[in-house]
Amino acid sequence: MGGVLTPNYNIFIYFKIIGKPWWGIFLFFTPFVNLIFHIWGCYLLAKKFGKGLGFAVGIVLLPFIFLPILGFGFAQYDPYGDGIKKFIKQGKRLEKLTNTIKKIED
């Protein structure tokens, strides 16, 4: 809770949320690399909350509007990003394929 009040600790919490290692903090202190990494981090943050590229652009350009939408809106944090949704879809496809094979065998 107090992560936002402590300088640089909020960056550490941000890295935990987007799923990157702690040593990436040094990228924020490297000139020009920090801009690229910030944009990429905004995309990863939007992805963790189930939003797309357009929302990530909104976070980069208007963070005072889009970050409260994440915080107070209905978006839910998914620690796996879109990966688990794709995995579930593949599982359903595999299940259909298995059922089709069983029908053919019978």
Image (cartoon, rainbow, N blue to C red):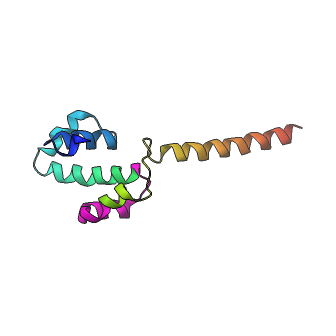
Q: In terms of secondary structure, what is the magenta stretch mainly? A: helix
Q: Name the image quarter holding residue 68.
A: bottom left
Residue at the image position 40 percent from the left and 48 percent from the top: 48
Residue 89: image location, x then y, percent:
60, 47
Residues rendered magenta in the picture: 48-66
Q: Name the image quarter holding residue 87.
A: top right
Location of residue 90 with respect to 52 vertically, above or below: above
Q: Name the image quarter holding residue 104.
A: top right
Location of residue 64 with respect to 90 vertically, above or below: below
Foreground of the two, 71 or 48? 71
Q: Residue furthest front?
A: 1
Q: How many marks?
A: 0
Q: Residue furthest right?
A: 106
Q: Any magenta on residue 64? A: yes
Q: Is residue 30 left or right of residue 18?
A: left
Q: Any magenta on residue 69? A: no
Residue 65: image location, x then y, percent:
28, 65
Residue 3: image location, x then y, percent:
22, 41
Q: Is residue 17 left or right of residue 36?
A: right
Foreground of the two, 88 or 7? 7
Q: Is residue 94 left or right of residue 106?
A: left
Residue 27: image location, x then y, percent:
17, 42
